[in-house]
Image (cartoon, rainbow, N blue to C red):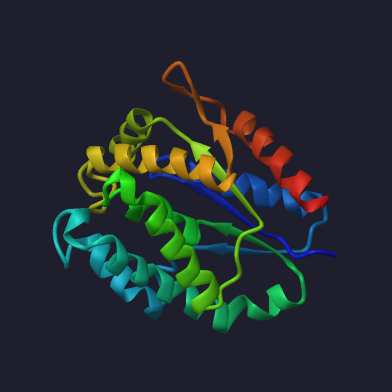
Amino acid sequence: MSRHLIVIEGTDGSGKSTQAELTCRALTAAGVDFKRLTFPRYKEDSSMLVRMYLKGDFGAHPEDVNAYAASTFYAVDRYASYKTDWKGDWERERVIFCDRYTTSNAVHQSSKLPEEQLMDFTRWLFDYEYRLLGLPEPTCVIFLDMPPEVSFRMLQKRQGESGDIHELDHDYLKRCHERALAICRQYGWHRISCAENGEIRPAEDINRDVQAVLFEELAK
């Protein structure tokens, strides 16, 4: 049996939580022994800096904390999670399914940088987390491609003015989406289209596409 660390990724408002839930139900129905993880872990002490950042304690706009500093906030939470929770599962070759991972830093934090710095940043990020911190590298990343205007509309409907500093910034979400598409091309992430003609596809239809990628990965 080979190791599998599968990540479902997307910008804010892309339906990650719904797709993660549907995917976990499919894994359970198929009898797959897996460990589900969700990042950041907002209820854990290791996410304190993440919570402060998103609340705006370091500045009211995402760009007030540079990409490298903000990335370390999230990396610390993942490192603590791995060391205290799922390292044994990974070593026993249990399937790991993540709702967000290092890949979220790549999408969100790279949006703070000029486009020409994107690949330098992602190389630094993946080296930092996977080599220097020793976190497992994903074997499969599934990106939920939701157009930013649809995402922002959903976030406004869901949260109004109460979202975090990422969710309230339309331009930031747009940049994240642009960076994500470039990263998908560069690193071979699987892109799942989540909207047609400006309207969200039914969640079950999206999940059929997600499952097709997922079970192909598990068959390797």
Q: Position of residue 30 (x, y in %)?
A: 82, 50
Q: Is residue 197 left or right of residue 118?
A: right
Q: Determine whether, in the image, residue 66 is placed left or right of residue 189.
A: left
Furthest-left residue in this view? 60
Quarter of the image holding residue 69?
A: bottom left
Task: Specify the quadrant of the image occupied by residue 76.
Answer: bottom left
Drawn side of residue 89 relative to residue 172, left or right: right
Quadrant of the drawing holding the N terminus: bottom right
The spot of residue 203 in percent (x, y) is: 57, 33
Query: Quadrant of residue 2 in the image?
Result: bottom right
Q: Is residue 129 above or below residue 220?
A: below
Numbered label tally: 0
Taking the spot 34% from the left edge, 52% from the top edge, the residue there is 110
Q: Residue furthest top?
A: 197
Residue at x 43% of width, y 64% of height: 125
In the foreground, 43 or 210: 210
Compared to residue 191, the image places residue 37 above or below, namely below
Q: Is residue 167 left or right of residue 191?
A: left
Could you say where residue 187 lies in the image, as x and y percent from the top left? 55, 48
Outermost residue on the bottom side: it is 84
Residue at 37% from the left image edge and 35% from the top image edge: 151
Query: Residue at (44%, 68%) from the top-left corner?
Result: 41
